[in-house]
Amino acid sequence: MSVHPALELRSLHKRFGQTEVIRGLSLSVQAGERIGIIGPNGAGKSTLFDLISGRQVPSSGQVWLDRQRIDAKAPFQVNRLGLARSFQTSSLFPSLSMFDNLRCALLWQLGGRYSPFKWLSGLGEANARVEQLLEQLQLGARRNTLAAQLSYAEQRALELGITLASGAPVILLDEPTAGMSRTEAAGFVQLIRSVTVGKTLLIVEHDMPVVFGLADKMAVLVQGELLAFDTPDRVRADAQVQAAYLGQRSLAKRQ
């Protein structure tokens, strides 16, 4: 019996005027795989995430999520079909607590919509799910802290929790450890690993130890094209990748 991909990109192209940012990119991701996406600045990584998540429409090509074509759908429709995305910068309600930020993220998923006639404290299912997320994020002690008062790493963890709140099986993380210290990044990688068990994960990351240590496979983008797609060890040893992006010397230092 054949197994269909959790996410499939078919000959994607994206042009802005005369500039082609994504050039015929095809990629198949199986359920539960963790894919690291790397490439030099301008390689098209963020544009690729925009195309997958519905923020931009391909010039040509297709995006399929669990056998459903999604490249013409709006971001909220893509999210409801099972794909959630975080961004390079946190987007939180600074004057709300960590608990309430997570609860707001859960309202639509649980059918609460944004009704002014419902007491939030009465949403027992949402409250229980928030408590579960706080436990997963290891931030239960900070549940009542305002988002504006959280440390940067804690804000990124809250952003991760908001992304997970939808329950989507496919998660896109865009530079989740950017701006963190080496110690913070190492701890955050362990957090990502634990909270995304069983999910399909695509992660754009410039920190090589982070992405090589987390991913099952690496996709290397150069000038909008897929240069390599293989295991981290094979990508690390690929001469084309070394020449085009990582560099022989810098890559050897990371082994």
Image (cartoon, helix red, strand yellow):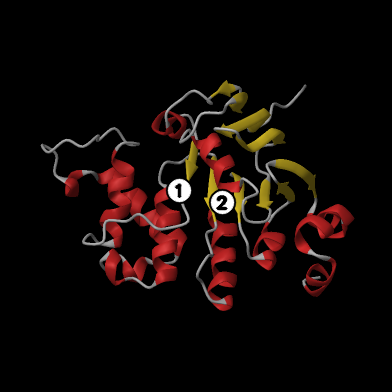
Q: Give x and y (percent) for residue 226.
A: 74, 41
Q: Is residue 199 left or right of residue 215?
A: left
Q: Nearer the viewer, residue 37 or 151?
A: 37
Numbered label attached to residue 164: 1
Amino acid type, label 1: Leu
Up-down relation of residue 196 to residue 178 (above or below) = above
Numbered label attached to residue 196: 2
> Which residue is at a point 44% across and 35% down the rendered structure image?
79
Q: CA distance from mark 2 to mark 1?
A: 8 Å
- Badge 1 marks a residue whose secondary structure is helix
Up-down relation of residue 188 to residue 231 (above or below) = below
Numbered label attached to residue 177: none
First in sequence: mark 2 or mark 1?
1
Q: Give x and y (percent) for residue 223.
A: 70, 45
Q: Is residue 70 left or right of residue 120?
A: right
Where residue 5 sits, quadrant-wise, is top right
CB under 8 Å between discs 2 and 1: yes
- Badge 2 marks a residue whose secondary structure is loop
